[in-house]
Amino acid sequence: SVMAISDLVISARDQLDPLMCEVVAELEAADNAYPLAFFTQILMSLRSTTDEEELMELFFRLSTTAFQGFVFSPPETQRVDELLESCEQIALTLSVGGSAH
């Protein structure tokens, strides 16, 4: 049987997928291999995320971006920042709403 995916996870996926695709497209265009592999992997994980725990795990992995030693161009930095900002917003919603139910 198919597990019901929470509305929160669905809306998070809908919100983050296009942002992550923009990051990936930007990195692909620049042939920026290391971060491209990192974000492509996370995009795949995002698309298979079914619960809030997996989503938080994903945010944690994304939060390590700054420590990976990646070198980003200004447009890449902008895309990555937009993505991480959205993640932060969603993570706040999760930590507030998650335990209330």
Image: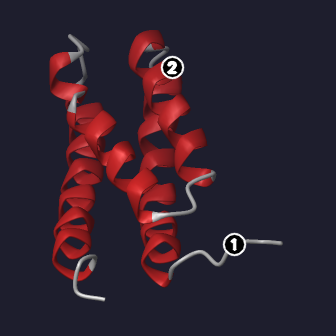
The answer for how far apart the CA atoms under marks 2 and 1 are is: 29 Å
User: Quarter holding the N terminus?
Assistant: bottom right
Left or right relative to 68: residue 25? right
Mark 2 Cα-neighbour bin, 10 Å: few <14, some 14–19, many ≥20? some
Residue 25's spot in the image, x, y percent? Answer: 52, 36
Q: Quadrant of residue 98?
A: bottom left
Judging from the image, what secondary structure is the residue with disc 2 in?
A: helix
Mark 1 Cα-neighbour bin, 10 Å: few <14, some 14–19, many ≥20? few
Kind of residue sitting beneath label 1: Met
Q: Earlier in the sequence, mark 2 or mark 1?
A: 1
- Point out which mark residue 17 bears: none
Left or right relative to 24: residue 88? left
Residue 51's spot in the image, x, y percent? Answer: 50, 63
Rendered position, 36 above or below 23: above
Work out whether residue 3 or residue 10 is closer to the camera in this orientation and state it: 3
Q: Nearer the viewer, mark 2 or mark 1?
A: 1
Judging from the image, what secondary structure is the residue with disc 1 in?
A: loop
Rendered position, 45 above or below 15: above
Give the mark count.
2
Q: Quadrant of residue 77?
A: top left
The residue that mark 2 highlights is 37
Rendered position, 37 above or below 20: above
Residue at the limit of the structure toward the right, as seen here: 1
The residue that mark 1 highlights is 3
Name the residue at 45% across, 47% down.
Answer: 20
Kind of residue sitting beneath label 2: Ala
Work out whether residue 24 or residue 88 is closer to the camera in this orientation and state it: 88
Name the residue at 30% across, 51% down.
Answer: 83
Residue 64's spot in the image, x, y percent? Answer: 22, 28
Residue 91's spot in the image, x, y percent? Answer: 23, 63
